[in-house]
Amino acid sequence: MKLNESQRQRARTARLCAEGKLSTREAAFKMGLTMRTIQKDIIKYRESGKSAFIHGNTGKKRCNPENERRKEKIIQIFNNTRINGNNPFEDITYTYFTEILSEQFNIKASISHVKSILNSQGYYTCIKHKVKKERRAHLFRERKEHFGELVQADGTPYDWFKDGKKYCIQGFVDDATGCPVGLYMTKNECLLGYMEAFVNMSLAYGIPMQVYPDKASVFFVNRKTDDNEKHLTQFGVMMESFGVDMFPAHSPQAKGRIERFWQTIQHRLPNLFRLKGISTVEQANEFLRDEFPKIYKARFFKEPKNKESCFVKADMKQITSVMKATFPGHIDKSGIFLLKGYRFFCPEITDRKILIHLNEREGLWITDPKTDKRYSVKLVESDTSGDMPEVMKVLIDRVFLKNAKPKFREVYMDIDDVVLSQIKPRKLRKVG
């Protein structure tokens, strides 16, 4: 049996000492060993030669039936688990797979042990560690002390279902605890996604003190204006109505906690979707609202410095009435109005300016800007030549078309394409 490099060095040193070419003291200094150890090596070499330096257990197979059974079970789980025909452990990290083994299969093992087993099967982690280049330094910002004092807002497109199609999760992450407080998935990043994520947060926790997003056009008016008036996007109007302070981050690093949150769930959520058999946006949104925050909190929760929450409970009727996408429009003398290629009919109001409203829970309706009176509408016909964002198509399908399957042209654009100066923000009464 061959000696490894360390064994060869010790055998060579013992031979030189046995031949009188090297003193025991010199050998001990050279090898970093004690003189007593060198003397033992010389005796072993004289008795058995080089073979004396091969460990007695070298080449022997470990005989621990329990460990072997556990190894085989881990291999079987990794290779043969199928949910809806898919292996939920494709592109999974060693750490996350170890956690799943412990939580769902009651198999306790170290990450390094699981890694060695997966490597023996030809599997290597999907995370590629890049060589760090010299980058501009960013000062550390301490977490806020209270839960709900500040929430970071952002969205990220990703292949969440591992089907080659990207969907965007928009969300809010609490700065003090690092946990998600409101998440919502849509076809593309848009106002409707942030609205629904905010509603989910309000239902679960309440209204936060501050919102910290980037400079996206959903949140802020970025074009230059000649007047001195404060121009707001629709989302900005909603935040003013709730009395929420919203200010922008000037770089991704400034809101690094939510950026790291996205990195974490991109390596976990697709596998979790497969484990749960989730394959549609509707199923994903239900899971993101009801279950995922608890799962994430159990693993990554940070205890805030102050246990008092800054979330403020509010009247949910007011929240759902304010959280809507609004568009200006005109209804003609026949009671017909257009919304980006769709024709709608309302017999109760004719020949005047109107406001058209959309949200997930109530669908589509219109109001008279002068009286704020609300009117229901009916879909007359659709024209696929309009620039209708995909999320609006899906919403109108749910509300009006139901079982119909019209072939719409897929156009992706930001839903928040107009700033409504005629909508005046109104402060809402907070309760609790």
Image (tube, rainbow, N blue to C red):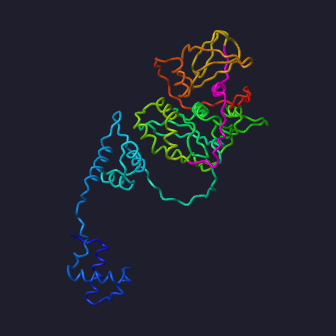
The vertical placement of 148 against 57, above or below, is: above
Residue found 56% across the figure and 46% down from its top: 259
Residue found 38% across the figure and 42% down from its top: 104
Magenta span includes 315: yes
* Quarter in which the N terminus is drawn: bottom left
Classify residue 14 as left or right of residue 291.
left
Classify residue 204 as left or right of residue 224.
left
- Which quarter of the picture shows residue 147? top right
Which residue is the extreme one toward the bottom? 20
Residue found 63% across the figure and 31% down from its top: 416
Of the pair 149 and 417, the residue shown nearer to us: 149
- Which quarter of the picture shows residue 366? top right
Q: Position of residue 420 (x, y in %)?
A: 70, 28
Q: Position of residue 271 (x, y in %)?
A: 42, 41
* Any part of residue 213 in sight: no
Of the pair 10 and 381, the residue shown nearer to us: 10
> Where does the magenta region start and end?
302-331
The vertical placement of 325 against 371, above or below, is: below
